[in-house]
Amino acid sequence: MTAELTAHSGTAAGGWTDRPSTAEGWLERARQVATTLAADAVERDRALAVPTAEVQLLKDSGLVTLLGPVEHGGGGQDWTTALRVIRAVSAGDGSIGQLIGYHYLWFWAVRLVGTPEQVAAVEEQATRDAWFFGGAVNPRDADLTITLETGPDGSEELVFRGEKSFSTGGRVSDVTVLEGILEGTEKHVFAIVPTDQPAIVFKGDWDSLGQRLTESGGVSIDGVRVPWAAAAGYVETEQGWEFQPRVYNTLNVPLIQIIFANIYVGVAEGALATAATYTREKTRPWPYTPDLKESATQEFYILEAYGDLRSKLWAAEALVERAATLIEAINAHPDTVTEQERGEAEVVIAAAKQVAIDTGLEVGTRVYDVTGARATASSVGLDIFWRNIRTHSLHDPVAHKRAEVGRYALLGELPAPSWYT
């Protein structure tokens, strides 16, 4: 790596030997990780290196097993805690906040669509071995094609082929979630497969304006073989392997969208905190005014701006927290979730996402108003926060999120499940 992670509070990056036992303990651990990441986030961003050390930090801190069962060494935490952890890590480094957020989604994917036996098996191994998850499930590209072929032992296997232009986690993942359509049918199949295999080739072509260390480049899938028993949610019947749908299967989109919102709020928190430190330590008061101040922290316009931005960020945080309560309510009874519950949660999440984007972009821009011209120096690195939010907030058009909320507010309509709602 061109830039290396800096130690935090006398603890070498990845030097933890214990695991927190409470939600607050895990959040404090996430803050420690964020502090480590923030120390050289700008340098690492500029280097555009593969975030191998950063993922190892997430593993060593225990954060990758936050949602895992306690009996297998996991944190046993809920999504409220996971989303707070995502915010905390994103405040230190938005790229790594995205990586841990997507990891949590894909770790949970087996809960969304798997059989009870698959859930138990995957969560045990993923927690015990501290798997880091990636996913090649970009819905804007064509689905991977799945063909049926005879395996070495004579059994029928699913074989995935195709390409995805985005695959967050990429080369730093231990396992990758694939999704495709069985040729000649309308059957969608999810599967968790080992990342390190010849049939998966990452292109290493991620070079975007922001979120530069997310390993989100393209990937070629050519011959990944999966037994039917590993097809998430499929059970063998007299008619063959079949999937039993339920509303909870569609929670992956609300989950990923609320993860997005928490990334943006976290990055904005990092921007405001970084700017505040700069203002206190380096910003000079304006000398050409009848109302001279001794320090920049006494300038009325600076105080007003910080008050405005802080208030808006608190409001955005309150909305993402409200959305988390709806996710928890759904997770409490996954087998009996109604379309109404799912739809109402998606609307609130859509509202949270648009507010997080608007507030995050405003914070990322206005921090220069309260720090001054010298804060535009490349070495200061305030640009990283706006770049990260601007890049990832284009994942899907925020106008459609506003329209979702608008249809609900005006017409009482709930969004139908899709790849983006």
Image (cartoon, rainbow, N blue to C red):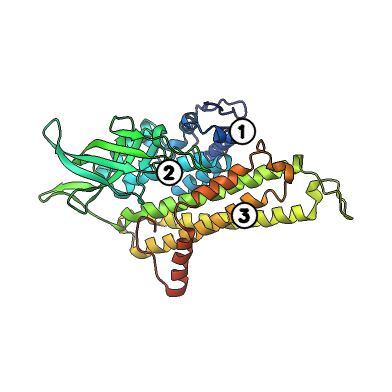
Q: Nearer the viewer, mark 3 or mark 2?
A: 3
Looking at the image, tell me whether mark 3 or mark 1 is earlier in sequence order.
Answer: 1
Return the residue at label 3. 362
Q: Residue furthest right?
A: 290
Q: Quadrant of residue 244?
A: bottom left
Residue 132 visible in the snapshot = no
Residue flagged by tag 2: what amino acid is it? Tyr
Looking at the image, tell me whether mark 3 or mark 2 is earlier in sequence order.
Answer: 2
Q: Are marks 3 and 1 in contact (CB under 8 Å)?
A: no
Question: Along the horizontal axis of the image, is 403 left or right of 198?
Answer: right
Rendered image: mark on residue 102: 2
Return the residue at label 1. 39
Q: In the rendered view, would you say 1 is above or below 156?
A: above
Q: Quadrant of the C terminus?
A: bottom left
Residue for point 16% across, 42% down: 148
Mark 2 packing: few (<14 Cα in 10 Å), some, or many (20+)?
A: many
Q: In the rendered view, would you say 364 is above or below 410?
A: above
* Count of numbered circles on the image: 3
